[in-house]
Image: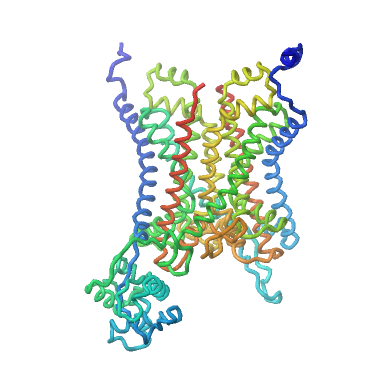
């Protein structure tokens, strides 16, 4: 007789080993997936942190009467003044080609900056002053250590001459890095060092406002109808199947709908937050309907029965008693839906929100772009300086998503009721 | 006094405000029209896609589109040039889409299933409460971020690994896009499968454990087979979202319409072509622009079929154990 409970039973050890392996593989899968998330977000944040600082170069500029006419401060050629200052710092540079390179150390915006400086400091006119001016993207990358000088000169964009100029400026303390306010206050630009996210951020906000104004009331209305009033019949079943399928339609198809119907049929303005918001509203509608129905279902029937029992009509019951109790849940669903809409890119490309927008859009009908589209555009840009801008914009986008989801969680915690 | 007594007259609701029936009806109409918007959206999608597709097939025969193996929609400026009509064979796009989705599912299936099994069967509630939201964050990250990471980090990594091993791998490969997409759909697979595994009745587990099976054996031989239909549904849903995914492939997969099954080569997908055909200036009547709608219809139909099947399977499965 063998003992069936003996631990020496055939292969028991092997079975326990495979049990452990099975468990480990599950844990490994989770760790791998979460590790991927950490590496992705971490590496992007690391790259993006560079965009928070910008390089500036100090130049000694001559604002004397030869250059700036005190009676017409705005009429002076600040470009020439800046160039003269650069030439004065490096008198050895003679050839036109080298000079152009030398001028390239500063951003094209440096002249404007100097003009602004003079406006802010009228006392400086007629004097020789030291000012900090914005460096170009190439110089900025070099100053941040992004250029591998051990490479052959022909292999890199930043030549030996440029390296030596910047080095000598650094040695004399004429370069520094400072907080990059521009990134948050500028619109898009062809120059990486000038590009900012404000225009796309405002575009995203306008789009989301439209999206919320359309999808929230409609989603709640549809949910109330389906949950509180609709009879269980073919029609309501059809609506339900429809909503479920709509939730799984690829987002780019919604873009095609927007292009064919909103733009070409109704002739609404292309690239506008209005159309973007409408398209995203249709996309988020199923999410909001499903969440709203769930929160309506969570309101216990006793509430309805009590209201009906003291003589409220069904519409009064629904709007005075059930909906207010379900509203926090509905709002939570809406915020989660908005967060998804905020990250959506593909449908916006279809309706032309992919244009180069340097100005902050002022209304719902202006041409605009959205933050994720801006990320897509910068990721495609050839200049290396856009790399850190793209990463920083991604971090800003992720921060907004985290904030919205946190808000949803807080709302749920605060207003959640267990009936 | 008389006012109150009249209110308490038999058959009159004393708390009723004066309410006209019209207001109630109006509210109902508003509610019903809200619910109809979902249907209108579906109709809008179908109509806009079908009309433009019909116009496209007036210019390009449907057989050329479905069975042609050459895709180059660039039309020449003058009509006299040879090949000015462009070539609209969608086969390379479809194989490209399927190749990338296949790679994505090859990654998402084991990762998602293993995570789901661990979370549902083995994890302590503490681990679960930490790991589950973290996994779900993967789905919350916008796809443009995955696209950026795939193009910037994964693709060069694959290329360099290939170079050290002596392979020539293009910088835009199906593999890079597929990997990023696979990770993105992991939470889709894991959270649905997690639900499904949780809904397998405890009695099945108890019976198996009572017979002396280990926990892992119970999961492998009892729980998973019982959950297969639901898991299949979740995989189908994940596949459908991989097929419809746009930004990752736009940024990491490339534009060249190669007819290949080699994951190291650049391929293009249906969604990539829709984006390239429709961004920028366009004349609305050219075959080039209209072809995007034909591709869109194709995409819509495929994902719809997958979703309908998946939802049927999942619902059927739920009913079985409820």
Please say whether residue B142 is visible from this viewpoint: yes
Which quadrant is home to the N terminus of chain A?
top left
- Where residue A62 sits, quadrant-wise, is bottom left
Give the total number of marks visible in the rendering: 0
Task: Point out residue B168 in the picture as x, y percentages from the top left corner.
Answer: 41, 63
Task: Point out residue A166 in the picture as x, y percentages from the top left corner.
Answer: 28, 74
Left or right of B322? Residue B51 is right
Task: Point out residue B7 in the picture as x, y percentages from the top left corner.
Answer: 73, 15
Q: Looking at the image, is B52 positioned above or below residue A287? A: below
- Where residue B233 sits, quadrant-wise, is top right
- Where residue A69 sits, quadrant-wise, is bottom left
| Residue at 41% from the left image edge and 75% from the top image edge | A115
Colour pattern of the rendering = rainbow
- Give B229 or A77, whichever is nearer the viewer: A77
Please say whether residue B306 is visible from this viewpoint: no
Task: Point out residue A283 in the picture as x, y percentages from the top left corner.
Answer: 60, 45
Left or right of A344? Residue A107 is left
- Give B34 or B107, whichever is nearer the viewer: B34
């Amino acid at each position: 007789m063998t003992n069936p409970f003996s631990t020496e039973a055939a292969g028991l050890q092997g079975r326990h080993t495979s049990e452990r392996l099975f468990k480990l593989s599950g844990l490994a899968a989770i760790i791998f997936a979460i590790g991927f998330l950490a590496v992705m977000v971490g590496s992007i944040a690391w790259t993006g942190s560079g965009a928070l600082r910008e390089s500036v170069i100090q130049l000694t500029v001559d604002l004397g009467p030869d250059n700036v006419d005190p009676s017409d401060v705005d009429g002076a050629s600040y470009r020439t003044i800046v160039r003269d200052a650069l030439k004065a710092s490096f008198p050895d540079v003679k050839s036109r080609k080298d000079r152009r390179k030398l001028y390239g150390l500063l951003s094209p915006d440096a002249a404007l900056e100097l003009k602004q400086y003079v406006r802010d400091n009228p006392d400086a006119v007629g004097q020789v002053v030291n000012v900090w001016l914005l460096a170009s993207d190439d110089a900025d990358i070099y100053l941040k250590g992004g250029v591998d000088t051990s490479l052959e000169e022909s292999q890199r964009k930043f030549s030996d001459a440029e390296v030596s100029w910047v080095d000598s400026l650094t040695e004399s303390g004429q370069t520094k890095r400072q907080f990059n306010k521009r990134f948050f206050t500028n619109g898009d630009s062809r120059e990486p060092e000038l590009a900012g996210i404000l225009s796309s951020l405002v575009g995203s906000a306008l789009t989301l406002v439209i999206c919320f104004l359309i999808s929230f009331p409609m989603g709640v209305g549809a949910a109330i109808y389906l949950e509180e009033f609709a009879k269980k019949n073919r029609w309501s079943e059809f609506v339900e199947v429809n909503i479920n399928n709509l939730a799984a339609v690829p987002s780019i198809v919604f873009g095609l709908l927007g292009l064919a119907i909103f733009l070409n049929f109704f002739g609404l303005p292309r690239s506008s937050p209005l159309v973007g918001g409408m398209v995203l509203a249709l996309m988020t509608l199923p999410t909001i309907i499903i969440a709203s129905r769930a929160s309506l279902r969570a309101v216990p029937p006793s509430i309805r029965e009590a209201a009906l029992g003291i003589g409220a009509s069904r519409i009064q019951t629904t709007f005075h008693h059930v909906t207010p109790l379900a509203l926090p849940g509905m709002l939570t669903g809406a915020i989660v839906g908005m967060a998804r809409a905020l990250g959506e890119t593909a449908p916006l490309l279809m309706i032309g929100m992919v244009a180069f927008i340097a100005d902050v859009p002022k209304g719902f009908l202006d041409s605009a772009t959205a933050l994720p589209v801006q990320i897509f555009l910068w990721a495609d840009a050839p200049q290396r300086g856009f790399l850190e801008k793209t990463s920083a914009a991604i971090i800003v986008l992720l921060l907004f998503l985290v904030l919205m989801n946190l808000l949803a969680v807080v709302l749920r915690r605060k207003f959640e009721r267990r009936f | 006094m008389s006012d109150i007594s009249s209110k308490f007259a038999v058959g009159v609701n004393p708390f009723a405000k004066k309410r006209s029936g019209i207001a109630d009806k109006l509210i109902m109409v508003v509610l019903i029209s809200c619910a109809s918007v979902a249907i209108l959206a579906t109709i809008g999608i179908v109509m806009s896609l079908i009309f433009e597709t019909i116009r496209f097939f007036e210019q390009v025969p449907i057989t050329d589109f479905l069975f042609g193996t050459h895709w180059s929609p660039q039309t020449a400026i003058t009509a006299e040039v040879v090949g000015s009509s462009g070539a609209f064979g969608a086969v390379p796009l479809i194989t490209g889409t399927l190749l990338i989705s296949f790679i994505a599912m090859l990654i998402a299936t084991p990762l998602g299933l293993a995570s789901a099994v661990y979370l549902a069967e083995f994890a302590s509630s503490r681990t679960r409460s930490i790991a589950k939201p973290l996994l779900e964050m993967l789905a919350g990250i916008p796809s443009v971020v995955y696209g950026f990471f795939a193009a910037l980090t994964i693709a060069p990594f694959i290329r360099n690994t290939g170079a050290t091993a002596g392979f020539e791998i293009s910088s835009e490969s199906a593999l890079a896009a597929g990997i990023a997409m696979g990770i993105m759909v992991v939470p889709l697979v894991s959270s649905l499968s997690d639900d499904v595994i949780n809904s397998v009745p405890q009695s099945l587990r108890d019976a198996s454990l009572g017979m002396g099976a280990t926990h892992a054996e119970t999961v492998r031989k009892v729980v998973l087979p019982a959950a297969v239909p639901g898991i299949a549904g979740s995989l189908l849903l994940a596949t459908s979202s991989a097929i419809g995914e746009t930004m990752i492939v736009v940024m990491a997969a490339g534009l060249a319409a190669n007819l290949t099954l080699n994951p190291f080569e650049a391929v293009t997908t249906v969604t990539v072509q829709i984006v390239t055909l429709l961004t920028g200036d366009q004349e609305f009547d050219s075959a080039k622009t209209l072809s995007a709608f034909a591709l869109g219809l194709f995409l819509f139909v495929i994902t719809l079929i997958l979703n309908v099947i998946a939802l049927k399977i999942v619902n059927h499965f739920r009913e079985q154990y409820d």
